[in-house]
Amino acid sequence: MKLTFWGAAQQVTGSMHLLEVGHYKILIDCGLDYEKETYQEENQQFPFDPASINLVILTHAHIDHSGNLPTLVRLGFDGQVLCTPPTADLTSILLFDSVELFLRKQSRKPRTKRGNFSGPKPLYLHKHVMDTIDRFVTIAFNKPFKINGDISLTFIPVGHLLGAAAAVLTINDHGEEKRIAFSGDIGREHYPVLVKPDPIPAVDYFVCEATYGGRYHTKDQTLEERLIKEIEEACIKTPGRLIIPAFSIGRTQSLVFALNQIFTKKLLPPVQIFVDSPMAILATDVYRKHHNLVNQEAKDFYKTMGDEFEFEHLAYVQNMKESKDVSNYFDPCIIISSAGMLEGGRIQDHLYYNIQNYYCTILFIGYCAKGTLGYKLLSGAPIVRIKDREMMVYATIRQTDLLSGHGDHDDLMRTVKQTGQPKKVFLVHGEDNSLKSLSAALQEDGFDVVAPERGEVFEI
């Protein structure tokens, strides 16, 4: 067998790993690499012939794992994409949204003399997304699926996002049974709506994400306590507004449920909440559809209080007119809008009108990749560019990791140890410091660890 790391190698985005079992080629994830400002150009070509790939395994829906699938299809891949049912539903939403982002980005540049848009050409169009969705084959958790006579696949729940899975492959390699697992992204033990990660069984080789290697989530404060504090300071003590950039899929649903619990228990006086993201509305319906896969806390809340994602003073913004009305809403309020890294979506409108508002707090609740607008704000940039305009930053910038969907250093260590004593642990999906910290800790515990470079090949 041969394993080649073509994405998320010594960086966070663009997950893509190629496993070759004889002549059979399996691609595990096919995500967008958007760590460079020219990411559309960077993702145009693959380092292999897409038509040569027999199968894709998709661990979860997030765009850094799924976002380049339509390009793969456009360039010749004609096999199946195996994933869980919620992953199929959520990925469909994200991919169609990606097309809209590409088209908007293209149209922002002036037209050429021939009348064509001069912006970057979309990576793919709606047709390619539809062709990709047609290739989805869904598999339930913990149900072994025979890919062919020599390879079977089992999806293990790992939290992080509804439907997110570790992919465990059992392979007959010339009469020798070998097991290799790909973690996808590992979730947390206690997280609103989502289940905690199941143990990954003993394997011979383990490809593990390292996003939070060497970092630890806040332990001295609960999510409820932090949200109450931020809302009190931004909306109650001072009559301002709290803007929370949140990924429409996953983070928004968990945040809405946490706010539902706070206001249902009357821990704060009522504050108007706007969820301004069409994609979040679609994703929330997917969460309702697959309610059997949410955690027990959410199921119990539903039995006693009703829908976790609906409550008084919560409004889902349906269209651009309503979104503009939110900008003109002058009473204290909370605005939840996408995208989480501020690289598109309606959040940019809210930033445009509020980044210079002293009575506005922007609370980041997730990771922001280098080069993104979110990263620049978190790095303390005094001036940022929004909608082709340089703007001073007067709003208060805050951040919490309590809604991070990634497990921290201890969670990652526990996950690796559950796999027994693999012959080798491959660390991916992490920045340099995270990779080094997690690698050192694992090596101290006796694991053979490597953080592969892009294109590095291993015979296993």
Image (spheres, helix red, strand yellow):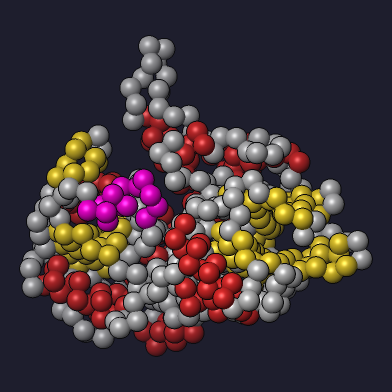
Q: Position of residue 436 (x, y in %)?
A: 50, 63
Answer whether residue 261 is visible to the viewer in this image: no
Q: Quick check: 180 above or below 126?
A: below
Q: Nearer the viewer, residue 285 or 238?
A: 238
All told, the count of numbered labels is 0
Q: Quick check: 71 above or below 82?
A: above
| Residue at x 77% of width, y 55% of height | 459
| Residue at x 46% of width, y 45% of height | 34
Q: Is residue 395 left or right of residue 261?
A: left
| Residue 373 lies in the magenta-colored region | yes
Q: Quick check: 378 above or below 157?
A: above
Q: Which residues are magenta?
A: 368-380
Q: Position of residue 64 (x, y in %)?
A: 51, 52
| Residue at x 56% of width, y 45% of height | 68
Determine the image quadrant of residue 222: bottom left
Q: Is residue 437 left or right of residue 131?
A: left
Q: Is residue 145 left or right of residue 456?
A: right
Q: Is residue 350 left or right of residue 201?
A: left
Q: Position of residue 267 (x, y in %)?
A: 21, 84
